[in-house]
Image: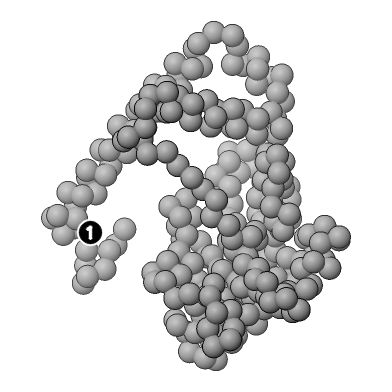
Amino acid sequence: VRWEDGELRIMFDPPYLVPLDRFAPVADADRVAASLVELLAGYRESLSPELHCLFDRYTYLDAAQKVVGVGSVGTRAWIVAFADAQTGDPLVLQVKEAQESVVERIAGPCGLPSHGERVVRGQRLMQASSDMLLGYTGAEDEGGHVRDYYVRQLWDWKTSTDLDTAAPAEIEALGRLCGWTLARAHARSGDRFAIAGYLGTGSSFDRALAEFATSYADQNEADFRMFIDALSEGSLATGGRFRV
């Protein structure tokens, strides 16, 4: 967000971030904004009661549509900016659509009222310290279909290691850290004794993971080569637009 004409506004950064007034007529933008405000009223009820007073200090300013990551292609995502009514301090929330888990196709429904609640409960369970404003909500879309969402603060705290220049010791340390974090999440959400018994004390599981990772990397490279070949042949483009 940035100050614009004395007000905090979301930056226009296409195609990743497009404010409402840049892709919709004024009437439609106002309608979507009102729907988002109503949507977040339901989100407020999913927060702990002691956080209601904190959330109520902020007033709606602006909203934008955000391009999602690879794992969320095809879902809706919004950025909503608020400001403290007294201090002007900004608060930016991300509203992401939550759809059916792929696990449900095999294990059946999780039993919770919404997919947004499922995502939030899972994050709170696995993460040692989750976002205090993590919550969920849901609403009907323009076609009358109920869509579930989860909401969190928009903070991009992700970091990564440059594998092309990293020393072997750095890569090993990164692997250990990722493994420890994943193991801790599983131990918090599952039967840690059953997991430990399944893994055993040998190296069979370690070797299986290494073989899977190698095969997965090879498959990614093969898929990417196929994608690049298709681009060069023009088979993915029709009228200047991708059909991917």
**What is the image's colouring?**
one colour
Given residues 235 and 97, the one toward you in this image is 97
- Asked whether the viewer can see residue 237, the reply is yes
Crowd class of label 1 (few under 14; some 14 to 19; many from 20; radius 10 Å): some
Residue drawn at point x = 66 percent, y = 56 percent: 116
Tell me what residue is drawn at x 52 percent, y 65 percent. 76
Q: Is residue 146 visible?
A: no
Task: Work out whether residue 107 or residue 60 is closer to the camera in this orientation and state it.
Answer: 60
> Which image quadrant is residue 165 in?
top left
Residue 14 appears left or right of 195: left
Report the residue marked by disc 1: 236
Q: Residue at x 19, y 55 (%)?
A: 231
Q: Position of residue 15 (x, y in %)?
A: 39, 69
Rendered location of residue 210, percent (x, y): 42, 22
Which kind of residue does numbered mark 1 sit on?
A: Leu
Residue 101 vertical placement versus 2 (above, below): above
Q: Is residue 112 left or right of residue 165?
A: right
